[in-house]
Image: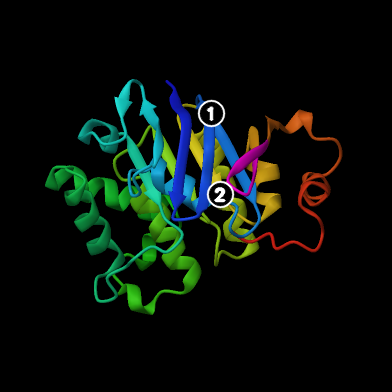
Amino acid sequence: MELTIDRLTKQYKNKIAVDRVSLQFKPGVCGLLGANGAGKTTLMRMICGVLKPTGGTISFQGMDVSTEEYRRSLGYLPQDFGYYPNFTGLEFLDYMALLKGLPGSTAKRRSQELLDLVGLKNEGKKKIKTYSGGMKQRLGIAQAMLNRPKLLVLDEPTAGLDPKERVRFRELIEELGRENIVLLSTHIVSDIEQAADRILMMREGQMIFDGAQKDVEGRLEDFYLEQFGEGEETDA
């Protein structure tokens, strides 16, 4: 199983947001770090087919990012995820499952499984407008996993989660990364340090570091600050 990115570029007028990035991914958890405006979200949106690249290609197992087959292999949690406030959590997952092409009986069973998995089993019949920020984020993680994706892309997935919830999330991601490709972008360095097998660092649209945890001397946060400078913003 392999995701291949070849000379991927995205340009907005006079700004190059992603600059000829080439990467290959195999099963495991890959964490992406970078300061505000580094190009992380743009890169992830192109991988998910939300943005069209200016140049370069993206393929998964030979499937182009524009194909329906590619999308069936993909699970995506964007940084700003839209919810339907008057839906219950269970209704929302059932609806998203049907949009992803899951049969009705399978959709209901899978929705229940995922509510349990993300700790919302007892909240499934409550309306989303009553959920806390952390609960909404957990629901977003659940919807990204509905179709059992082989490629899971998560942009700021731990935003709004308390420390206990972040531990639960990291355990879940580690489990998923054993057989699937998981791309995780977050400004919380400790989440990547504890969950990721591979670390990418991005600055001004280019990759400035690509290595395993063992390639980082000392604490990841200290290494990260050395690359970007302590005064630079480190949110997504």
Q: Which quadrant would residue 140 be assigned to in this image?
A: bottom left
| Image spot of residue 22 (x, y percent) | 53, 29
The residue that label 2 is drawn on is: 185
Instruction: Report the residue at 23% width, 31% height from top.
Output: 69
Q: Residue at x 39, y 30 (%)?
A: 57
Q: Quarter holding the C terminus?
A: bottom right
Per the picture, the main secondary structure of the magenta-coloured stretch is: strand
In the image, the segment drawn in magenta is 201-208
Location of residue 162 with respect to 171 vertically, above or below: below
> Tag 2, which secondary structure?
strand
Look at label 2 and name its amino acid.
Answer: Ser
Identify the secondary structure beneath mark 1: strand
**Residue drawn where x is 50% and y is 26% of the image:** 27
Q: Which mark is residue 23?
A: 1
Going by the picture, which residue comes out furthest to the right? Answer: 218
- Of the two numbered discs 1 and 2 in the rendering, the one whose residue sits closer to the viewer: 1
